[in-house]
Image: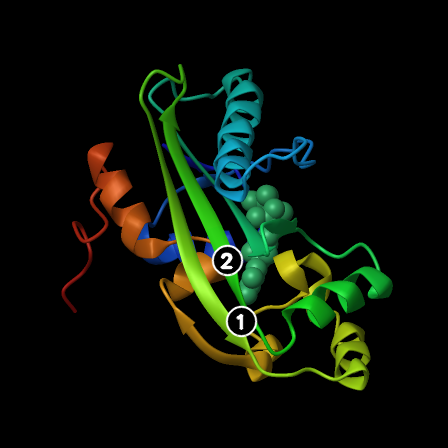
Amino acid sequence: MLVLASASPRRKELLSLLVKEFEVLPADIDETPHHQEAAKDYVVRMAVEKAKAAINKYKVQPDADSSAIIMSSDTSVVIDGDILGKPASLDDSHSMLRRLSGRSHQVITSLCLSDLRFDHVITKCIVNDVSFRDISDVEIEQYWKTGEPHDKAGSYAIQGLGAVFVRSMSGSYSAIVGLPLYEAALMLAQFGIHPLEGLSHE
Ligand SMILES: Cc1cn([C@H]2C[C@H](O)[C@@H](COP(=O)(O)OP(=O)(O)OP(=O)(O)O)O2)c(=O)[nH]c1=O
């Protein structure tokens, strides 16, 4: 059994492109960065901590499969070395999008796959560059009212209306949305799960 340790509907949707059957088990962790923690280290640590929290929850389930594989991920927006998580308010969203306006930033996504004993663990960190056009204060307020930025790192969604701010990007689109499909497929294969096997030929 594959277990996706995530509350993100985007991650569930993206993983369902690769795997037909999996369980979803959100893991609650403290997402506060450590003092002077480098962005890449933080993003990988978050995925590892989500995996560990989900393992602890999963193991105590009566029908737990001892050969289950846990997948977890984290996405953060990084500008000038600062980590931007999800906005807590319009003010927060405003200061994030003001910083991103007219500039390039990075979206860093980590992926962690592990067995239940946390013996076999693979982590991967994917760095993408995204360039924004200038954004006005009025647009920031209008965008906030759509609700879209509320649960997104950096306060925007490239897969939604936030795309109107994106001049260009390089790297992995699925990683920015929350789950890097190319890397996920390669890592799943290392655990014996092969996404292209068993698909119908209709
Ligand atoms: C930059 C960007 C982020 N996001 C999302 C992906 C993640 O869901 C979210 C970043 O928060 P995360 O903490 O990575 O994930 P989450 O809290 O939504 O889910 P979980 O921790 O349970 O797995 O931002 C987009 O959907 N589009 C984007 O363009």
Residue 166 image label: none
- Give the mark nearer the N terminus: 1 vs 2: 2
Identify residue for label 2.
Answer: 107
Name the residue rendered at 37%, 44% in the picture: 21
- Callout 1: helix, strand or loop? loop
Q: Which part of the image, by quadrant, shows the C terminus?
A: bottom left
- Secondary structure beneath dot 2 equals strand
Q: Which mark is residue 158?
A: 1
- The reply to whether discs 1 and 2 touch (Cβ–Cβ < 8 Å) is no
Q: Quadrant of the N terminus?
A: top left
The residue positioned 23% from the left and 50% from the top of the image is 195
Position of residue 63 measured from the top left corner of the image (x, y, whole percent):
47, 21
Query: Would you say residue 192 is visible in this rendering?
Result: no
Tag 1: amino acid: Ile
Q: Position of residue 172 (x, y in %)?
A: 36, 62
Q: Is mark 1 within 8 Å of ligand 1?
A: yes
